[in-house]
Image (cartoon, grey):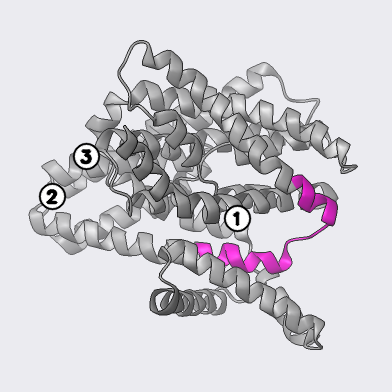
């Protein structure tokens, strides 16, 4: 395993260089621009290998192979990014959209998982890329939730209404946790098919989802007590950092959903602690600290996604399968989002173009890639990983770059 300090130093340096190139010469949104430059760099390294610089290509691939993307994101960056995203989502606004967010994060994710899995199974069979049905369902589970990291990064630069931004941000923050729970259950079915029962699934759901919510409330309560008894911005920033790092680690140890716990704790911190137990100076310091953490880790993550292209396995048939799945996943997203929103709209007024915006704004990102990498090693994982990468790249580049104009056109027309 490559030394973690060396790898971290290299990633930070590369990310800073790519961010500078993008800002100075290209001008795309930072995360998207960095990812495109990283992908172009991966392609350049591959071409150099074909031109006789095989040792250099092999050395770069060896470094990338030494980075456990799944652990780096799921057990490293994710807690920081989720907390930073939840910190600026108003809990009262979220409560007003609770039925929309709850339905999309549960019914929407489960419906999409099954439909994507079923269609993928028959599509790949038609392309002579047979994939067991359980792997197709796992692919559906990891690709169905929208990635809060990618979504929040995009929402930051769009001037959308509070109601619309709350719906999009709230869905992405919670369906990520639900999607991980569904993925974990399906992975257990793959690994221990004879031991999984409906009762076992119910226990897992209670431990992960409900347990995550309860633990997140506990974390928020502890943080509130600690910050309300002092007035020192340095210590209070440190407390929020301990909340994220220690809380996420303890959640995993307790077998509850770390992502859900941190989102809940972030919402409480942003809507309760910032208003009731923090001075103006502390509030500004907390905001500045977490905004900086969010920006840095986002750039590093998207650079890493782009560089991972160099070691993603490739087969031509897989490529055609990935392209064919892009419109299918968008269509499934329309169905899984459209049905609950249409039902809720009969009882509650919602933004006019909410379904269209949720469909096109349903970005996939690093979490999907990380979950794909957690599958058992072998050809099936390689296929799922490649399909995931194609969907993620399309989502971030095409949907991410066009989401702003798309939303502006819809809101102007309305």
Residue at 68% in and 32% down: 116
Q: State which region is magenta.
A: 302-321
- Counting residues from the start of the chain, the first of labels 3 and 1 encountered is 3
* Residue 264 visible, this orientation: yes
Q: Residue 409: x and y, percent? A: 37, 42
- Looking at the image, do the residues carrying marks 3 and 2 touch, with CB atoms under 8 Å apart? no
Is 146 left, or right, of 414 in this rendering?
right
Q: Residue 107: x and y, percent? A: 53, 22
- Counting residues from the start of the chain, the first of labels 2 and 1 encountered is 2
Judge whether 318 appears above or below 281 on screen.
above
Residue holding disc 3: 271
Mark 1 Cα shell of 10 Å, populated few (<14), some (14-19), many (≥20):
many
Q: Nearer the viewer, residue 18 or 132?
A: 18
Q: Residue 68: x and y, percent? A: 63, 62
Judge whether 316 appears above or below 21 on screen.
above
Residue holding disc 2: 278
Is 319 in the magenta? yes
Q: Main secondary structure of the magenta part?
A: helix
Is 296 left, or right, of 302 in this rendering?
left
Is 226 in the magenta? no
- Looking at the image, do the residues carrying marks 3 and 1 touch, with CB atoms under 8 Å apart? no
**Quadrant in which the N terminus is drawn:** bottom right
Task: Give the quarter of the image for residue 37.
Answer: bottom right
Point out which mark residue 393 bears.
1
Q: Residue 40: x and y, percent? A: 61, 72
Is 281 left, or right, of 287 in this rendering?
left
What count of labels does the image hold? Answer: 3
Furthest residue to the front?
Answer: 413
- Looking at the image, do the residues carrying marks 2 and 1 touch, with CB atoms under 8 Å apart? no
């Amino acid at each position: 395993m490559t030394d973690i300090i060396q790898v971290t130093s290299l990633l930070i340096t590369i990310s800073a260089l790519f961010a500078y190139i993008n800002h100075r010469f290209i001008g795309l949104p930072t995360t998207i621009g960095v990812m495109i430059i990283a992908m172009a760099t991966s392609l350049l390294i591959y071409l150099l290998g074909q031109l006789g610089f095989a040792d250099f290509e092999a050395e770069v691939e060896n470094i990338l192979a030494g980075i456990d993307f799944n652990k780096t994101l799921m057990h490293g960056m994710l807690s920081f990014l989720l907390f930073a995203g939840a910190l600026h989502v108003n809990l009262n606004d979220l409560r007003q959209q609770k039925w929309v967010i709850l339905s999309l994060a549960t019914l929407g994710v489960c419906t999409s998982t099954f439909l994507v899995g079923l269609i993928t199974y028959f599509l790949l069979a038609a392309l002579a890329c047979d994939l067991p049905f359980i792997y197709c369902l796992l692919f559906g589970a990891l690709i169905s939730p929208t990635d809060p990291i990618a979504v929040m990064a995009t929402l930051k630069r769009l001037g959308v209404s509070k109601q619309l931004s709350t719906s999009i941000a709230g869905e992405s923050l919670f369906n990520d946790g639900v999607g991980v729970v569904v993925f974990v259950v399906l992975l257990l079915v793959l690994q221990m098919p004879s031991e999984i029962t409906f009762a076992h699934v119910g226990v897992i759901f209670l431990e992960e989802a409900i347990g995550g919510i309860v633990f997140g409330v506990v974390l928020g309560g502890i943080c509130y007590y600690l910050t309300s008894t002092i007035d020192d911005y340095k210590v209070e920033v440190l407390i929020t950092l301990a909340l994220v790092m220690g809380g996420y680690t303890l959640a995993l140890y307790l077998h509850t959903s770390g992502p859900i716990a941190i989102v809940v704790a972030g919402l409480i911190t942003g809507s309760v602690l910032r208003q009731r137990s923090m001075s103006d100076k502390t509030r500004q310091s907390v905001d500045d600290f977490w905004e900086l953490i969010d920006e840095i880790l986002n750039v590093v993550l998207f650079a890493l996604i782009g560089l991972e292209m160099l070691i993603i396995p490739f087969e031509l048939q897989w490529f055609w399968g990935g392209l064919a799945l892009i419109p299918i996943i968008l269509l499934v997203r329309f169905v899984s989002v459209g049905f609950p929103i249409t039902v809720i709209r009969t009882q509650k007024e919602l933004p006019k173009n909410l379904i269209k915006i949720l469909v096109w704004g349903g970005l996939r990102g690093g979490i999907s890639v990380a979950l794909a990498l957690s599958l058992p090693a072998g050809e099936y994982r390689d296929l799922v990983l490649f399909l995931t990468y194609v969907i993620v790249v399309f989502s971030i580049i095409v949907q991410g770059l066009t989401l702003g104009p798309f939303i502006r056109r819809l809101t102007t027309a309305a």
